[in-house]
Amino acid sequence: MESAGCSATAVGNRDMGSQRDLSLVPERLQRREQERQLEVEKRKQKRQNQEVEEEKSDFFAAAFSRERAALEELLEGEESVERLEEATSRLQGLQKLLNDSVLFLAPYDLRQGQEALTHLQAALAERRQELQPKKRFAFKTRRKDAALATKVDTAPVAPAAEGIMSPSLPLKDEEALGFSWACGFSNLEFQVLEKRADEVHQRDILLTELSNCTIKLYGNPNTLRLTKARSCKVLCGPVSTSVFLEDCSDCILAVACQQLRLHSTTNTRVFLQVTSRAIVEDCSGIQFAPYTWSYPGIEKDFQGSGLDRSKNNWTNVDDFNWLARDVASPNWSILPEEERKIQWD
């Protein structure tokens, strides 16, 4: 009995000693242990997320490669209207696949996908040109004031597949590939320019070599391209597919679109609504804010454009010159709210 009592007393003493030992553990060490456990959990979660992203990337790569091969086969086969219609439909599907995957794709993979789509679009446009009947030769009288015309007004081509990014090629190369632009303005300065909704509806707009101009495009264009603009303000209704800026500086752009890409552009503010993501390349001093321009009939134009008015990824920007995911790109930023008050008129 005495031995058992001694054993119980000894066990009790050890338990009390353990409690005293725990109470003696410095609070700093306990906090360090908690932080270590949190860090382990974060690493575990990050590893799981990475595995999910890799699975999604693998699925995208396989699906994109399969659809691309099928599209190339259509373009290389016998030319017919039916085959071109099927190719256009597949091209739209391929663009949608890329749009739906931008959130998890690495910038390099995203760029490769865009370049592949650009080449496929060029090939499709070339097939369309080859399928069109040859025009008979005829002399035409030239008007003396043709050289003074400021509007870029060429024959429209078949609409581009939905969502395809405008290729970043020189204009002469685009013409060689069969690209042409429906309407726009060029070689003007210190002008206020406008186009009505019926003038731009589902047409491709080119604005080039403009300086200190204000351009208002009411309605729903198919695409918009702005090149070599200096100190211009461009206000545009909802664009069904893509908007492309190249070699612009000190501009203000307000636009809603499916995709936006800026190349070699500096010190430009973009008031944006975009359903996929914006892309900047070789740019600096780009600032983004939400799209706020409005005019009578804009809701109808949004409905006709096919854009989702409730979806806006204006803060999701990919910089192809900045691959570090954990450090913000120095080439673009969010425009502070106090600087977003723009006089649109």
Image (cartoon, rainbow, N blue to C red):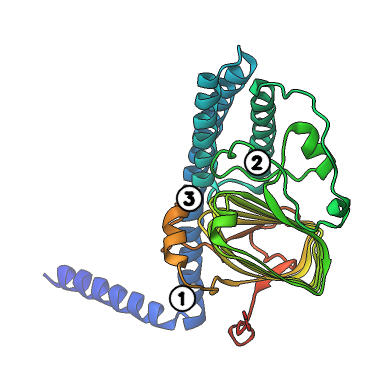
Question: Which quadrant of the rendered structure holds the N terminus?
Answer: bottom left
Which element carries disc 3, helix, strand or loop? helix
From the image, state whether disc 3 or disc 2 is nearer to you: 2
Residue annotated with mark 1: 30
From the image, state whether disc 3 or disc 1 is nearer to you: 3
Residue 176, given in percent of the width and then of the height, sits at 80, 33
Most foreground residue, 45 or 344: 344
Numbered tag placed on residue 49 in the rendering? 3
Circle 1: residue type: Gln
Circle 2: residue type: Pro
The answer for how far apart the CA atoms under marks 1 and 2 are is: 72 Å
Circle 3: residue type: Asn
- Compared with 139, 199 (above or below) is below
Q: Who's the residue at 67% across and 65% down the image?
A: 327
Residue 137, given in percent of the width and then of the height, sits at 79, 24
Residue 226, given in percent of the width and then of the height, sits at 73, 58
Which element carries disc 2, helix, strand or loop? loop
Whether residues under marks 3 and 1 lie with C-beta atoms below 8 angstroms apart, the answer is no
